Amino acid sequence: MVKEFEDAAFSMQVGEISEPVKTQFGYHIIKLTEHIPARNSEFEEVYQEVKEGFFVEKQEKVYMDKKAELTDKYEVYIME
């Protein structure tokens, strides 16, 4: 998160709408709808979340690669 955006967001109260905030990406108007406190996670909990995320990502890549391979190899018609 860029500093200007972070400074504005973390100085707001829930329900507040910011003035325009200029960053290197342009102008932003922020509405803070909820404050979620930071949490300290146990290693095993974070490890499992990351592991599951990588598994899903790998699974999607294998699926897309196989789909592309079969689409190139055979005539494919998608009927909607």
Image (spheres, grey):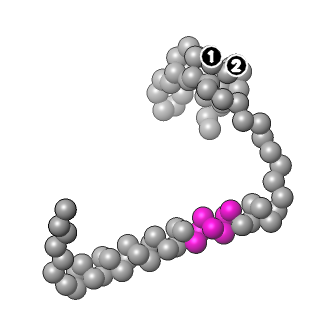
Callout 2, which amino acid?
A: Gln
Q: Relative to 1, say whether 66 is above or below.
A: below
Residue 36 image label: none
Q: In which quarter of the image is the N terminus?
A: top right
x, y percent for residue 72: 22, 80
State the predominant SS element of the stretch in magenta. helix
Callout 1, which amino acid?
A: Glu
Tell me the SS state at disc 1. Answer: loop
Instruction: Name which residue lies at 27% across and 82% down.
Output: 70
Determine which residue is flagged by label 2: 13
User: In the rendered structure, are the residues bearing label 2 and label 1 in contact, judged by CB atoms less than 8 Å apart?
Assistant: yes
Instruction: Name which residue lies at 78% across and 40% down.
Output: 38
Tell me the SS state at disc 2. Answer: loop
**50 within the magenta span:** yes
Neighbour tally class for label 2: few under 14, some 14-19, many 20 plus, Cα within 10 Å: some
x, y percent for residue 62: 44, 77
Q: How far apart are marks 2 and 1 (CA)?
A: 6 Å
Q: Which residue lies furthest to the front in this view?
A: 80
Q: Which residue lies furthest to the top in this view?
A: 19
**Residue 4: in sight, yes or no?**
no
Q: Relative to 53, say whether 68 is above or below.
A: below
- The segment highlighted magenta reads 49-55
Determine which residue is flagged by label 1: 16
Instruction: Name which residue lies at 60% across and 64% down.
Output: 53
Give the side of residue 41 with respect to residue 28, left or right: right
| Residue placed most toward the observer, 80 or 50 | 80
Counting the numbered discs, the total is 2
Tell me which corner region of the image, top left, top right, bottom left or bottom right, holds residue 9.
top right
Q: Relative to 28, say whether 49 is above or below.
A: below
Q: In which quarter of the image is the C terminus?
A: bottom left
Instruction: Name which residue lies at 67% across and 21% down.
Output: 14
